[in-house]
Image (tube, rainbow, N blue to C red):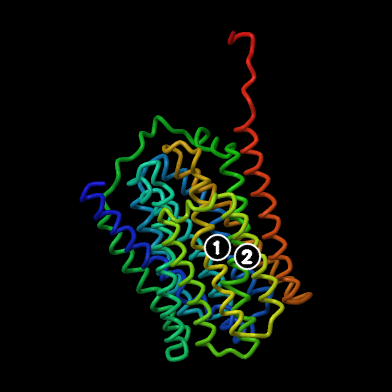
């Protein structure tokens, strides 16, 4: 990587930090705040799920557009702008409806995450794609961590509107910095058609790891980013403790994302990493809903941090392994659109289960989903291993 490329990758990582700060600074207090203003659990689930709806609808079209015209810079500028503007809406309409619309706009911003990742990964060789993925996810998690630290220590002092103002400011700073990105040479339009790009949907490897990411993201959005905070609050924790719980989660995510960007990750096979972490995430869901200890729940937040830092990095890099580089934006768009289904549906189902049955029923559903992921990943890796070991059959034409 030359000096100019090094400066560009550093710039992209800085923008990523501001971008995700804007997207997550209000998240630790979103559910408790909505409860405080008497929004129903059903509607809270819909509000949290709204963040995934926009991504579900837009990520594949954004990926196709990015592959055809190669203009990642435009999508990064647009994404950071939407991240800031969404919180401006929350400032002027601090109600359930305002947060619902704001989350739809935040989801639109997150749909452009495709361009951040594909542009950043394009500076690295194929053999270093896993490391590149881990580095940009590290910046992603660092932005969230700084967001959670900010809201934890300032929420009780300034309230939700000022927290949303910090989100707006970070989005605008990220947007301004995005204009300094050097435009990459676009892919030749005549070499790619929409129908040709859509053929990535037949890639079995991409689909399997997309489904696993769907479960991981759905469980994370429903538990760590939403109802776990409410459980802690209901147990008597103040806003600072709620924030510290989120800080522990994100600190763990940053630490383990850093580990995933080194050779340490190679000490254990990817099959075992994925299965073990999903299994631990299932145990997390069970324990969180069956304990009355705030301190124990805070410690348990390390587990979803591991899932975010290592598991999601592995799922992303593995999903892209068999993809033609010219179709990477479309493939990333499909990958992110599929896991956005989990980010949309899981919170809605969780909200309904909590409203009609109990919080334990919600977390039992999430734990079961993790165990299903363990089965799917183990079955897929074992099937792939058998195909590799299967002896070649000689045909008469080859003799």
Report the side of 137 relative to 357 (left or right). left
Report the side of 190 relative to 107 (left or right). left
Q: How many marks?
A: 2
Cβ atoms at labels 1 and 2 below 8 Å apart: yes
Farthest residue toward the right? Answer: 357
Mark 1, Cα crowd under 10 Å, few <14 / some 14-19 / many 20+, is many
Mark found first going from the N terminus, 1 or 2? 2
- Tell me where residue 14 appears, x and y as whole percent: 32, 63
Identify the disc placed on residue 289: none
Which residue is depicted at the point 59% across and 8% down?
399
- Tell me where residue 330 appears, x and y as whole percent: 48, 43
Report the side of 17 relative to 267 (left or right). left
Q: Which residue is mark 1?
A: 307
For residue 171, which quarter of the picture?
bottom left
Which residue is depicted at the point 42% across and 89% down?
158
- Tell me where residue 166 appears, x and y as whole percent: 38, 78
Q: Which residue is mark 2?
A: 281
For residue 299, which quarter of the picture?
bottom right
Which residue is depicted at the point 61% across and 53% down?
212
Farthest residue toward the front? Answer: 267
- SS at badge 1: helix
Report the side of 154 relative to 305 (left or right). left
- Tell me where residue 174 appears, x and y as whole percent: 33, 65
């Amino acid at each position: 990587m030359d000096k100019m490329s090094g400066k560009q990758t550093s710039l992209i990582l800085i923008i990523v930090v501001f971008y995700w700060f804007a997207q997550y600074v209000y998240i630790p207090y979103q559910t408790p705040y909505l409860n405080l203003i008497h929004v129903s659990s059903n509607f809270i689930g819909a509000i949290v799920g709204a963040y995934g709806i926009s991504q579900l609808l837009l990520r594949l079209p954004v990926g196709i557009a990015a592959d055809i015209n190669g203009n990642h810079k435009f999508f990064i500028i647009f994404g950071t702008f939407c991240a800031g503007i969404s919180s401006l809406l929350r400032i002027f309409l601090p109600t359930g409806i305002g947060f619902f619309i704001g989350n739809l706009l935040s989801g639109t911003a997150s749909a452009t995450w495709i361009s951040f990742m594909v542009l950043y990964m394009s500076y690295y060789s194929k053999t270093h794609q896993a490391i590149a993925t881990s580095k940009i996810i590290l910046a992603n998690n660092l932005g969230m961590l700084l967001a959670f630290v900010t809201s934890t220590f300032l929420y009780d002092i300034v309230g939700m509107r000022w927290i949303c103002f910090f989100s707006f400011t970070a989005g605008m700073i990220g947007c301004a910095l995005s204009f300094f990105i050097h435009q990459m040479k676009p892919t030749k339009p005549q070499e790619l058609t929409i129908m040709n790009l859509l053929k990535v949907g037949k890639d079995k490897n991409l689909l399997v790891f997309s489904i696993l990411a769907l479960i991981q993201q759905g469980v994370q959005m429903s538990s760590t980013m939403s109802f776990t905070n409410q459980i802690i609050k209901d147990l008597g924790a103040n806003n600072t403790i709620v924030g510290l719980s989120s800080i522990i989660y994100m600190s763990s995510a940053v630490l383990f994302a850093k580990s995933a960007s080194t050779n340490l990750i190679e000490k254990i096979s990817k099959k075992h990493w994925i299965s073990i972490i999903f299994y631990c995430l299932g145990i997390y869901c069970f324990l969180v809903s069956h304990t009355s200890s705030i301190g124990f729940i805070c410690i348990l937040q390390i587990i979803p941090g591991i899932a975010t830092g290592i598991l999601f990095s592995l799922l992303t890099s593995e999903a892209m392994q068999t993809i033609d580089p010219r179709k990477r934006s479309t493939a990333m768009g499909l990958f992110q659109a599929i896991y956005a289904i989990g980010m949309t549906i899981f919170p809605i189902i969780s909200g309904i289960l909590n409203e009609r049955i109990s919080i334990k029923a919600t977390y039992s559903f999430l734990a079961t989903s993790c165990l299903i992921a363990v089965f799917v990943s183990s079955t897929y890796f074992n099937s792939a291993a058998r195909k590799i070991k299967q002896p070649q059959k000689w045909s008469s034409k080859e003799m």
